[in-house]
Image (cartoon, helix red, strand yellow):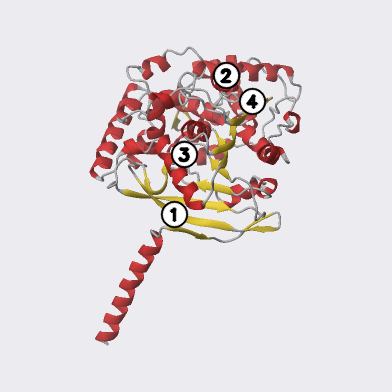
Amino acid sequence: MKKSIIHSVIMLFMSIIVLAQQKNQIGISQGNDIIIDNKNYSTLIGNIEVSEDYSNINSRKIQIPIFVVKSSNTNSSEPIFWLDGGPGASNILSENKIISASPIKILENHDIVCIGYRGVDGSTILKSKKVSKALKGKNNQLLSEKSLNNLEEKIKEYQLQLQKEGIDINKYTMLDVIEDLEIARKQLGYKKVNILSISYGTRVALLYSYKYPSIINKTVMIGANPPGNFIWNPEKTESILTKYDSIYRNQNLVDYKGSIKDIMKKAFDNMPKRWSIFKLDDDKIKVGTFTALFTKDMAGLVFEAYNRAANNGDYSYLFLMQKLVDNESSGTVFGEMSSKGVSADFEQGVDYRKTLEGSNTILGGNISKLYWGAAGAWQMKRIPEEYRKCRESLSETLIISGDLDVSTPSDNAKEELMPFLKNGHQIILKNMSHSDIFIKTMMTPNFLSDYFNSGIINNEAISTPDSIDFKLSMKFSKSKIFMMGLIM
């Protein structure tokens, strides 16, 4: 009996060791097939081990995940490296997201390659529950000095924790991500690559082209973010609200109820302390408004929320937007986001709180003030100046922008980046915001494959709506919103 127990304990111990080894196993192997439109595609999956500090041979090692969907063509051309949005979000696409992007034409001639972003993917994830909680603010005043000071305090505490764990945040910049991409490229056996980048990923793509120009074949940037633009500009947001106002006034699908900006101002001027039993936070509502406008399909809901508040005294829908902000902050990988943003765009000596507070726009500094009003607490080195500004690039680059994009306004790419792209081309899609341009580009047959295969840019292939549908796409009863307030 005793021998049996001892044997069982030994076997259990050995199983634990095997599982631990499998979990941290380094290498790339065959994965499960993925089925897209009834066709099977093979995949590669695994991890590469890289140095946290590429300049130190004795640096601690970190693991970065890799996921590849193989082309159906055994003699395929350059792979397409996927660089997703963020920072603070994974670069490893789920099977569902890949399928929903309808990449059949791309996969006819190119592998699709996802390489994890250090700091959010792999063995080291720079996420703090205390910082995430502080991002919700204090006393229902998200952008108050008390809230921002509390956020700074939690950031400093988290930095001390990371130091004790031996994690060097100075090694989680975009330039380090690019070195990871290069290690993966070489291990996968690719000589040159194409890049398909979205939002934050477009900045990584740009810096990649600066550092390794001979490696890049063609680049697509959807929602381009030139250097200096991790800070959202309140005046640019205001100008896009003015465009929405014009579209709203000239459409005939719903009754025009007055200037959107006037209605929003009235709603804020008359905002009560509570809706039902819940305290209202106008700062969070402004953040929620800004992020909701990442897609034009939310415009009807957003503007109806303000109309109900301003003209009927019903703040239920605005409270719903407030709660969505709380929900989103819980998932923020703040350390990774700050390492990328601060190392690239933070300017010493700038009082971001004062600068963003001084905006006389309807939505003010909102999310920029939240992140950049406490950014000085994330103490780290800046990347070299040559990567913190636009400079000439000969890489073939196609930029897709939207004229209603509040996150990466089309003017930023047109005025700041395009003059430096000697082989660049920009398409500005009408009545499209940030998420819309990605969906529309991916869902347009042959558009991307034509560009990556032969450099053809078919401007007219992407159709856009003549107006915006301001009808409510979804409705919520007050009782349902009340229950959301209790459980979210």
Q: Amino acid at mark 2?
A: Pro
Question: Left or right of 312: which side holds 51?
Answer: left
Q: Which mark is residue 327?
A: 3
Query: Distance from label 1 to label 4 (Cα)?
Result: 35 Å
| Mark 3 and mark 4 residues within 8 Å of each other at the beta carbon | no
Q: Earlier in the sequence, mark 1 or mark 2?
A: 1
Between 463 and 315, the one nearer to me in the picture? 463
Horizontal side of 241 relative to 133 (left or right) equals: right
Q: Can you tell which mark lies on residue 419?
A: 2
Q: CA distance from mark 4 to mark 2?
A: 11 Å
Which residue is under mark 4? Answer: 426
Residue 219: image location, x then y, percent: 59, 35
- Residue 282 can be seen in this image: no
Q: Which comes before the other along the chain, label 3 or label 4? A: 3
Nearer the N terminus, badge 4 or badge 2?
2
Q: CA distance from mark 2 to mark 3?
A: 40 Å
Neighbours of disc 4 within 10 Å: few (<14), some (14-19), many (20+)? many
User: In front: mark 2 or mark 3?
Assistant: 2
Q: Amino acid at mark 4?
A: Gln
